[in-house]
Image (cartoon, grey):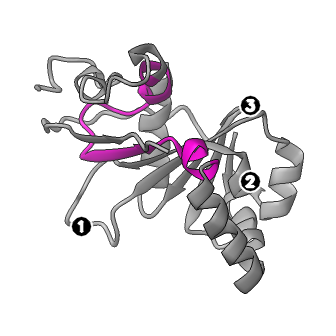
């Protein structure tokens, strides 16, 4: 599940029970898309 | 490596550069999320560093001189430093037209973390996402740096 940090410039993806993924900077959605592609 | 003809989902070439003091299978599991055509990444076995006597001395010093630092880290990153097993910093791309390059930090914890507690502590807001797919066409070499820290 994807969340936005209160500052707004950072997304946090709670990837699984032991992994937290922070997406910082521009293109957060693109970064996430790529990251999820890599998970599959 | 030509990313047009190889899978963008794996980074086997990167994994081959790691030190031999940990089974490759462990790295394959923990690094397979990294796109093969990423610009660079750094993988740190943070728990080994944190558990070392030197790191404990540093942590004690920080706790004494700047006690808010540990709490600030937990608020910003969701988990206390002592709960981190591995840290991976990824620079997936560098594009001239972006205000700043996107960076991905993956924190792997030693034990499963409490989602509800983390969301509340960080003040997170849910983001609705569609089924977006990456359609990258770049052809880049991977510059992979895997750091193994001996304690």
Q: Quadrant of residue B41?
A: top left
- Which residues lie in the magenta part? B27-51
Q: Which residue is mark 2?
A: B79
From the viewer's perspective, is A38 left or right of B120? left
Q: Is residue B79 above or below residue B128?
A: below
Marks 3 and 2 on same chain? no
Q: Chain of mark 2?
A: B
Q: Residue at x 49, y 27 (%)?
A: B30
Q: Which mark is residue B71?
A: none
Real-space CA distance between mark 3 and mark 2, rounded to the nearest whole angstrom: 13 Å
Residue A26 position in % (x across, y down): 42, 62
From the viewer's perspective, is B53 left or right of B2? right
Mark closer to the chain start, 1 or 2? 2
Instruction: Please identify, in this view, whether the residue under mark 1 or under mark 2 is nearer the observer.
Output: 2
Helix, strand or loop at mark 2? loop
Marks 1 and 2 on same chain? yes
Q: Which residue is mark 1?
A: B97
Q: Is residue B77 above or below residue B116?
A: below
From the viewer's perspective, is A38 left or right of A23? left
Real-space CA distance between mark 1 and mark 2, rounded to the nearest whole angstrom: 33 Å
Real-space CA distance between mark 1 and mark 3, rounded to the nearest whole angstrom: 35 Å
Q: Chain of mark 3?
A: A
């Amino acid at each position: 599940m994807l969340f936005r940090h209160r500052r707004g410039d950072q997304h946090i993806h709670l990837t699984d029970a032991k992994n937290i993924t922070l997406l910082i900077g521009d293109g957060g959605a693109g970064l996430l898309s790529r990251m999820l592609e890599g998970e599959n | 490596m030509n990313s047009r003809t190889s899978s963008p989902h794996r980074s086997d070439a990167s994994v081959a550069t790691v030190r031999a003091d940990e089974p490759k299978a462990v790295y394959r599991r923990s690094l397979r999320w990294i796109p093969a055509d990423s610009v660079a990444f750094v993988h740190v076995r943070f728990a080994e560093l944190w558990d070392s006597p030197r790191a404990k001395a540093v942590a004690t010093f920080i706790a004494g001189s700047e006690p808010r630092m540990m709490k600030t880290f937990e608020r910003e990153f969701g988990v206390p430093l002592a709960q981190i097993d591995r840290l991976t910093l990824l620079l997936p791309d560098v594009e001239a037209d972006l205000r700043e390059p996107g960076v991905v930090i993956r924190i792997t914890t030693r034990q499963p973390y409490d989602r509800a507690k983390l969301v509340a502590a960080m003040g997170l807001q849910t983001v609705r996402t569609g089924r977006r797919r990456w359609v990258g066409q770049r052809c880049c070499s991977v510059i992979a740096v895997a750091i193994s820290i001996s304690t």
